[in-house]
Image: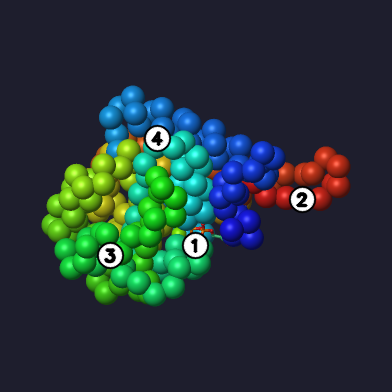
Amino acid sequence: MARQRIVTFNNSATKPEGAAAFDMLRTKILQQMRAQGWKRLAITSPGKDCGKSTVALNLAFSLSKQAEVHTIVGEMDMRRPTLAKALGLSGGGSFAAVLEGKANFADVAMRARPNLAFAVNYGQVRNPSELLQSSTIEPALDEIEARYQPDLTIFDMPPMLQTDDTLAFMDVVDCVLLVAAAESTSLAEIDVCERDLAAQTNVIGVLLNKCRYMDNETGQMGYD
Ligand SMILES: Nc1ncnc2c1ncn2[C@@H]1O[C@H](COP(=O)(O)OP(=O)(O)OP(=O)(O)O)[C@@H](O)[C@H]1O
Ligand SMILES: [Mg+2]
């Protein structure tokens, strides 16, 4: 987990670098979502590799430290799913099948903590755009929520600029976090994505990831 930058996984007294920042993000997101009565949070970015999945996993494990908060993470990247590998899961039913109404959430989801479950995809899904715009999604999500009563469902989305998969799904979420990567995402890209997202849902924030910093003691460059 540490190698994959999942810094909130362990609950040790000395927090790994970056964990405090995710705990702060968790608190802010939780406060805002509770205040507004929001339950569904999407995480996306303009281009690929900005750190959406890393942020989704860190946020989820950070949330799981609050015993009363129940969270589900749903992988919505159907073209290049990565969560199974990141979590060390192999073989199993895909979340896509649940969204299509072809599998039960209980048979597909993996409970990582008493208050945290993951539903991921194994391999590429056929017709990802059609699935994300499909009328089966909303009832499938409603059923999961009615049955398991999560306080929060986090959707790990694909990047926005290559396909319209993400925008198509924004109608069914309450809010979205836009992840940008310092040095690779341009201001114009953030601008256009934020505007498009705001037309469909509530933009809860823009997170700047992969910021470079100079270590004061060693003088070496690092990432945050
Ligand atoms: N803050 C960071 N500093 C340095 N590297 C990072 C940081 N966050 C994520 N990464 C690395 O960047 C790569 C892409 O991360 P991740 O898979 O989370 O991005 P993504 O936006 O979900 O990508 P995709 O568009 O493929 O879904 C991974 O190797 C990850 O370890
Ligand atoms: Mg990803």
Task: Evaluate whether residue 21 shows in this view.
Answer: yes
Residue type at the position of mark 2: Met
Mark 4, other Cα within 10 Å: few <14 / some 14–19 / many ≥20 = few
Total marks placed: 4
x, y (%) of residue 79? 36, 69
Quadrant of ligand 2 in image: bottom left
- Residue placed most toward the observer, 141 or 43: 141
Q: Secondary structure at mark 4?
A: loop
Q: Residue at x 59, y 44 (%)?
A: 11
Closest to the camera, between mark 2 and mark 3, is 3
Q: Is residue 31 left or right of residue 185?
A: left
Q: Is residue 78 left or right of residue 216?
A: left
Q: Residue at x 28, y 30 (%)?
A: 37
Question: Where does label 3 land, which residue?
Answer: 107
Which mark is drawn over residue 68?
A: 4
Q: Residue at x 64, y 43 (%)?
A: 12
- Above or below for 125 versus 154: below
Q: Secondary structure at mark 1?
A: helix
Give the position of the N terminus as an image quadrant.
Answer: bottom right
Which mark is drawn over residue 221?
A: 2
- Above or below for 87 versus 92: above
Which mark is drawn over residue 87?
A: 1
Q: Earlier in the sequence, mark 1 or mark 4?
A: 4
Residue type at the position of mark 1: Leu
Q: Earlier in the sequence, mark 1 or mark 2?
A: 1
Q: Is residue 188 left or right of residue 210?
A: left
Residues at discs 3 and 1 in contact (Cβ within 8 Å): no
